[in-house]
Image (cartoon, helix red, strand yellow):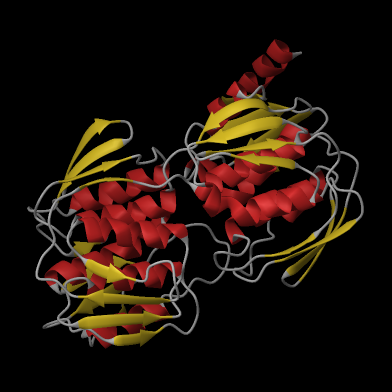
Amino acid sequence: MEQYVIKGGSPLVGEVEIGGAKNAALGILAASIMTDETVLIENVPDVRDIKVMMQAMESIGVIIQHIDRHTVKINGRNINSQVVDGDYIKRIRASYYLIGALLGKYKSAEVTLPGGCNIGTRPIDQHLKGFRALGAKDAGVVGGGMIVAHADELKGAHIYLDMVTVGATINLMLAAVMAEGQTIIENAAKEPHVVDVANFLNCMGANIKGAGTDVIRIRGVQSLHGTEYTIIPDQIEAGTFMFAAAVTKGDVTVKNVIPKHLESISAKLMEIGCEIEESDDAVRVVATKRPLHTHVKTLPYPGFPTDMQPQITVALGLAEGTSIVTESIFENRFKYVDELTRMGASIKVESSTAIIEGVSRYTGASITAPDLRAGAALVIAGLAADGYTVVDDIRYIERGYEDFDVKLRNLGAMIEKVEDDRGIQKFKLKVG
């Protein structure tokens, strides 16, 4: 099983190019099958979750042509089944977007219950509630762990989401774009990837207004057509490198970003003592001293992202004084704290709150990535630690970060992907 081996202590310096947003790409890939015409999508991230999604699409007859590493042509004309039940699809959460897409196009969908990182309860009740409102009276989970939704016809409806949920917001947009009449989604999620999926659908001929606000209005259309589209940059990948600069006392320019999407992250970095410089499509983070303590609470966009909570916790673990991090989205998001404690962190978790007493340094250790974002955060901790850190289960990290070790090496990090103890020893001999 592959591992990252890291020798810490080197500040990250230089420029890093951010890839396409994984969470936007997953919704856009699902949406692309809703037309019989060809769709060209650029800036697709080359990560495991995307590969699994494409595998699922191809299993039902979707034709995918890879133009280059980050560009694909997709044609859904020859879809031969509305059932997606391969074991591989259980590896990712966003498989449920295929329900909305297939239901919207064919009025029928059956998809295996989704998987993904075990960071807490992520029910699909709001998805099912919305599908039923649109006309899928039987929408639910049946024996064998399949989510089903069938309708004679789909009609616009007024849907109030009981909680802000990105997944349900995107899924209901997909199902509603070709429903008869108008659909209104209230208490909708406002994340950038929600807006990106809506923009993509509009480029295909949909009529969606209000994406990015808490009320989305959709006027159903007869059909969708082909288009060319470029996916937005990944807000979370960008934020991860920004915090890597902060933790290593580095100077990193994060390129190919939308600074507006990073405002809550930039604000917290400034609070803990970093200098931030913004340009049209880049953000520079300069850290010259130990971080300052602060408090942070994760919230739906435009609040501080739950996907950045492990990264800021790693930074605050090295801060002067006491910090408090409150997780309001997922209840299992502090599983990485035990691993960080192995490296010398002083963190006490009480329910959904972490109380952090800053320490002066981390010490290298053998640790395990429990999920995607926590895994990336532990790599950051290793970059700042004294000595060597070995991170296991990096398959989680590779679900959402493309060439993570390569990009870090280009910034001066001493990190390598290895397969066994022999690789670790070779790395240690090489770097001294």
In the rendered image, residue 351, in percent from the top left (x then y), is placed at 74, 73
Q: Is residue 54 visible?
A: yes
Q: Is residue 348 found left or right of 116 in the rendered image?
A: right
How many numbered badges does the structure rendering display?
A: 0
Q: Is residue 86 visible?
A: no
Q: Nearer the viewer, residue 86 or 92?
A: 92
In the rendered image, residue 355, in percent from the top left (x then y), is placed at 83, 63
Q: Is residue 297 above or below residue 364?
A: below
Q: Is residue 148 found left or right of 14 in the rendered image?
A: left
Q: Nearer the viewer, residue 2 or 279?
A: 279
Q: Nearer the viewer, residue 183 or 106?
A: 183
Q: Is residue 265 above or below residue 46?
A: below
Q: Residue at x 82, y 58 (%)?
A: 294
Q: Residue at x 33, y 35 (%)?
A: 70
Furthest residue toward front = 280
Q: Is residue 209 above or below residue 359?
A: below
Quick one: quadrant of the C terminus?
A: top right
In the rendered image, residue 157, in percent from the top left (x then y), is placed at 26, 86
Q: Nearer the viewer, residue 144 or 225?
A: 225
